[in-house]
Image (cartoon, rainbow, N blue to C red):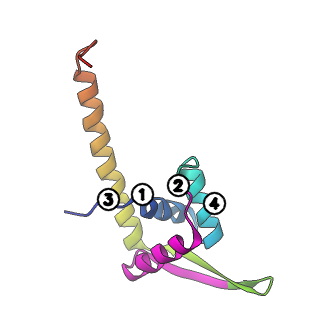
Amino acid sequence: MTDTLREPTFLILTALAARPQHGYGILRDVEEISSGRVRLRAGTLYTALDRMSSDGWVAIDREEVVDGRLRRYYRLTDLGAARLATEVERMRANTRAAEQRLRARPIGGTA
């Protein structure tokens, strides 16, 4: 059985599924994807990226210098994409089960 991804990890992987991004881009994308519910701090993001890199889910895509500062871009690996897909399917299955039970619920059920 695969462990459930924590929401920040899921959102970071989702952000990287579209294209390689640098840290600030990931932070903005996570906030957008979550409709503002999740706002990661930079330290939290880079700790998560280090962990996901160790797990083989993300990798450094490239580095460039912008305004004298190093900007590192991260990309989703095939292993990371597979892990994200597994989590999406788990969430779909849970959603289907909830929908079925809500449809079967008697109208005007007890409070």
Badge 1: residue crowd in 10 Å (few <14, some 14–19, many ≥20): few
Within the magenta stretch, is there residue 61? yes
Residue at the spot 48% in from the left edge and 77% down from the top edge:
47
Please report contact status of discs 2 and 1: CB closer than 8 Å, yes or no: yes
Q: Quadrant of residue 79?
A: bottom left
Residue in view at x 39 percent, y 82 percent? 54
Residue 93 position in % (x across, y down): 27, 44
Residue type at numbered disc 4: Arg
Residue under label 1: 7
Q: On the picture, is 100 further left or further right than 29?
A: left
Instruction: Measuring from the top left, give residue 18's x and y in whole percent.
Output: 55, 61
- Residue at which label 3 appears: 86
The span shown in magenta is 39-63
Query: Which of the marked residues, 2 or 4, is nearer the chain's N terminus?
Result: 4
Which SS class for mark 3? Answer: helix
Secondary structure found at label 1: helix
Judged from the image, the secondary structure of the residue bearing numbered disc 4 is: helix
Residue 20 visible to the viewer: no
Q: State which tag comes first along the sequence, 3 or 2.
A: 2
In this figure, which residue is indicated by the disc labeled 4? 28
- The answer to which image quadrant residue 110 occupies is top left
> Measuring 23% from the left and 21% from the top, which residue is drawn there?
105
Q: Earlier in the sequence, mark 4 or mark 1?
A: 1
Q: Amino acid at mark 1?
A: Glu
Q: Position of residue 36 (x, y in %)?
A: 58, 49
Q: Earlier in the sequence, mark 2 or mark 1?
A: 1
Q: Which mark is residue 38?
A: 2
Q: Viewer-nearest of labels 2 and 4?
A: 2
Q: Is residue 61 visible?
A: yes
Task: Say few, some or many: other residues with alpha carbon within 10 Å of mark 2 (under 14 / 14 to 19 / 20 or more).
Answer: some
